[in-house]
Image (cartoon, rainbow, N blue to C red):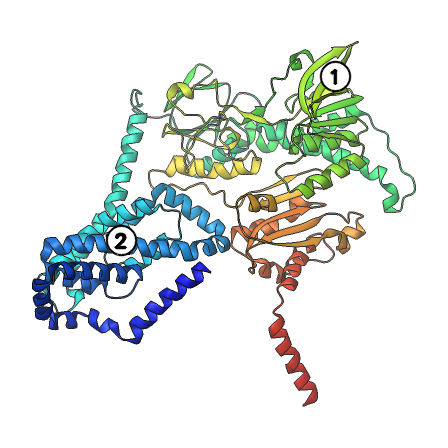
Amino acid sequence: MKKIILLGLLAVVVLLFFQFDLEQYLTLEYVKSQQEIIDQYYRENRALTLIGFFLGYVLITGVSLPGATVMTLAAGAIFGLFTGLILVSFASTIGASIAFLVSRYLFRDMVESRFSASLKSINAGIERDGPFYLFALRLVPAFPFFVINLVMGLTSLRLWTFFWVSQVGMLAGTVVYVNAGTQLGNIESANEIFSTGILLSFLLLAMLPFIGRKVVAVLRNRKALEGFSKPGEFDTNLVVIGAGSAGLVTAYIAAAVKAKVTLIEKHRMGGDCLNFGCVPSKALIRSGKFMSHIARSQEFGIGKAQAEFEFAEVMERIQQVVRQIEPHDSVERYTGLGVDVIQGEARVTSPWTVEVNGEIIRSRNIVVATGGRPFVPPIEGIDQVDYYTSDNLWDMREKPGKLAVLGGGPIGCELAQAFGRLGIEVTQVEMLPRILLREDPEISEMVQQRFTAEGVRVLTGHTAKRFIKRDGRDFLIAEHDSEEVEIEFDALLVAVGRAPNSAGFGLEEVGVRLNSNRTIEVNEFLQTSIPTIYACGDVTGPYQFTHVGAHQAWYTSVNSLFGIVKRFKADYSVIPWATFTEPEIARVGLNESEAQQQGIEYEVTRYGIDDLDRAIADSEAHGFVKVLTLPGKDRILGVTIVGEHAGDLIAEFVLAMRHGLGLNKILGTIHIYPTLAEANKYAAGEWKRAHVPHRLLEWVARFHRWRRES
């Protein structure tokens, strides 16, 4: 109500201004015609004239009414350069700040609710460069200042920053106008004040903050490189340390643009994803899924089905899958692409040099893509038991009777279900209140119910305290509701997260800064604190996904090779991911939990896949598509899909969000029948059904009735 009242008052002021044609008193012609009278009044009533002019100027600029330019000229004509400059400088800044506050109070909440994603990135830029942008805009008198006031009010820029930057930024233009006003009799039009030369001078002045910033960056980089001797020439354009997803893609792109690139890997080409993570885990999941279909044979009209298998053969198949994919990431392939591949342990010895196998390689730039490793928590007694991580799990050949899985994140959940389906008694232990904490609670509950139905024992809210041996058997002692719970196991799988490989090869010695979680600190260009060294992938974050590492690799390769000409900021605006449990979960953008935490208004549209023809035919009629949109709009804020092939189905929404397409576009796209992909279209249809223009349809109904009766 307060906003409505304020908006009403402003509307009344603006209406009265134009209704009574007050604008006629703020024209150059009128001021010139009344100059003698105004001068006489000023000589007789100095204080009253100064106060009246000041308040009038604040009102004009605060309400964003036309006339500020003429009033600035009048200030010079009436009060002279010095007094007029002081009056206008402070009155204009105070008025601008009032307009800034009014815009913020009336409109910012509405704009944030409707354009939260866009405003978030804008505010990030304002936090970083807001004063620079504002100062530059204030230095260009041709740009409407009232627009700057209103737009800046919608951002996160602080009022004090807005005030002092405006005060300083508008000063040069104010001097020009007030000084011109001292010669008011010779001015026929305000446009005469600025010649082309003066305007160009202001534009050059506006560029000074950015030029200064570039100079500061150059000096900062030079300081970071102090104490190191730069080689006179280089052996290669780029050294890439680590041949996982991020490193391979970096080297591939560098070679594609004809740079000389050296790729160093101390272990196995392909990194964790190929050898220990994505590929072997999905091969295991596929075998487990086959066994789950055998157990569900009656759902497919097959009364009885059974399968015999050797656990060791299942695990050996995983290695066969890895070997089949290995050529994609092999030394031979990358050598054929023009990459100089070296097997050995790299050590960064300076901002331009890397030592490997006793040889020093001089490079223009270095990219660190050393990935991560499984994190093993320091739990009492864990070093007394044999445990598996993703590094050594795939060497397992003897089937354990009881498997304890420590961790309720995506990796722990995927492996717990897969091993459970192979006939292992699995107990999953998670210290948090639910598994898959990053997902909405209903999704965690769905997955846990499925696990329980398949025989996986899920213990949430259980904190691992210590490991003990008793009578030759291994036990995990966990605490739950202040009581100790004993969990017996034959094999232990630790899946509580990953730690970055950022130490032990010279980074900190040359001055590369690390974050508190030991990831490498990088700027928006993926450049470290040493300007010649870049980083990408799990070693820097913020997302530990193979596809994000590959995404970052484009920026590290292009920025390191061509940064002297043009640099690109890494874009994390649309990041999808999937958890390959059953039901499968895929995400992009916000889910409900995140939207609520961030205070973002949203609408939810939900389509149940249990109603989809293809899902019913496949006996996979479970899950849903949940879409978050702006209230009343079809613009997508985020999508969660739960169900068969969710990771494949999400791609359509990733494309839509990346290119600003709404649900109406998805609804208008032909989808093949019968496919699971139709779920996306039906979700869009649910949104459309909820936003039917009922009033318009009433008129349409009347039209049809008239056609029938006429």
Label 2: element kind: helix
Most foreground residue, 75 or 555: 75
Answer whether residue 200 is visible to the viewer in this image: no
Which residue of the protein is positioned furthest toward the bottom in this rendering? 710
> Quadrant location of the C terminus?
bottom right
Q: How many residues crowd around disc 1 within 10 Å: few (fewer than 14), some, or many (20 or more)?
A: many
Expressed as whole percent of the image width and height from the top left, the position of residue 148 reads: 32, 55
Type of amino acid at the residue the image marks with label 2: Ile
Looking at the image, residue 353 sits to the left or right of residue 186; the answer is: right
Expressed as whole percent of the image width and height from the top left, the position of residue 644 reads: 72, 45
Answer whether residue 107 is visible to the viewer in this image: yes
CB under 8 Å between discs 2 and 1: no
Residue on which disc 1 sits: 475
Q: Reply above or below: 218 against 656.
A: above
Q: CA distance from mark 2 to mark 1?
A: 71 Å
**How many numbered marks appear?**
2
Looking at the image, residue 20 sits to the left or right of residue 287; the answer is: left
Q: Reply above or below: 435 against 228.
A: below
Type of amino acid at the residue the image marks with label 1: Phe
Most foreground residue, 586 or 367: 586
Expressed as whole percent of the image width and height from the top left, the position of residue 337 reads: 50, 34
Quadrant assignment, res 66: bottom left
Q: Residue 487, which numbered label?
A: none
Most foreground residue, 454 or 337: 454
Q: Nearer the viewer, mark 2 or mark 1?
A: 2
Residue on which disc 2 sits: 94
Expressed as whole percent of the image width and height from the top left, the position of residue 562 reads: 37, 38
